[in-house]
Image (cartoon, helix red, strand yellow):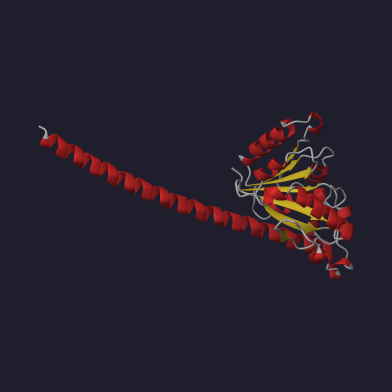
Amino acid sequence: MAEFKILVTSQKGGVGKSTISANLAAYLSQHNHKVALLDYDLHGSSSKWLNGAPKIGVHIQHSPLPLEIGGGRPVHEAKQKLKRLCYTNEVVVADLTWTDSISAEFLFEFDLVIVPTSVSEIELNATAEFLDRLSWVFQSTIYKPPQLLLCPTRVSHEQMADDSIFKQYFPVSLMLAPAVLEGHSAKQLYMRGYIHDFNDACGSSFREFGNAVISVIAQHKQAHMTHTSTSNLRMKALLHMAARYESKMDSAFVNFFHQNS
């Protein structure tokens, strides 16, 4: 089963969602993770990127959701496709353009939700409104909510000095990823290569972003190991108690037998 499932999603195009998805899958693959890219989008930009670029071991699957059908079938199919990839990969990176026809409960299938956003005031407001509609998922106390990572993308050098993102109110708790800078390398490398291989500012910023995601994966793995260890200790304690109880019952039965024989 996959140790980590990532959803890269946004309701708005042009924020670098497919760029993030394809290059993050490649970066994780080059850092000793067995990775699959699950491209839910109709146009398949992220899967096309990886199919055209040099092969680095990422399992690529383009499976557009049949959103025109409506109802629960699209989400059911999305879950099944995700589940199948989880059996043979350590990390699955899913790329999905969000629409309100998708049930928000689908987000519970993932460990980390990455939302790319540009840093203009208008775009940040739109991102905040998008997250507000999904806030109940990230605040859930019934199901385990995914972690939320906000990723500023296509940020110019001039915008690096802008603190608008820190002034923006977001309705949910989130982590802020290192900004991925705008650069010619991203446009030039589509279906040819990977951003993290470039030594320009864009490549360097993407490596920082990729390392931040790797840190989240490592923390999740450590927490899972701790939880598993604690569960094992509890199980051993319960088995020990059961064995003692069974021994006492056996002794009581023997004493009762002797007294009545």
Relative to the observer, which residue lies in front, 85 or 152? 152
Looking at the figure, which quarter contains the N terminus? Answer: top right
* Residue 25, position as x, y percentages in the image: 73, 50
Residue 23 appears in the figure: no
Q: Is residue 188 left or right of residue 228?
A: right
Q: Is residue 218 left or right of residue 50?
A: left
* Residue 43, position as x, y percentages in the image: 85, 39
* Residue 196, position as x, y percentages in the image: 77, 58
From this view, report whether residue 33 is shown above or below residue 179. above
Residue 122 appears in the figure: yes
From this view, report whether residue 157 is shown above or below residue 15. below
Figure quadrant of residue 172: bottom right
Q: Residue at x 75, y 31 (%)?
A: 71
Q: Residue at x 74, y 56 (%)?
A: 171
* Residue 54, position as x, y percentages in the image: 78, 48
From this view, report whether residue 243 is shown above or below residue 209. above
Q: Number of labelled discs?
A: 0
Relative to the observer, which residue lies in front, 14 or 28? 14
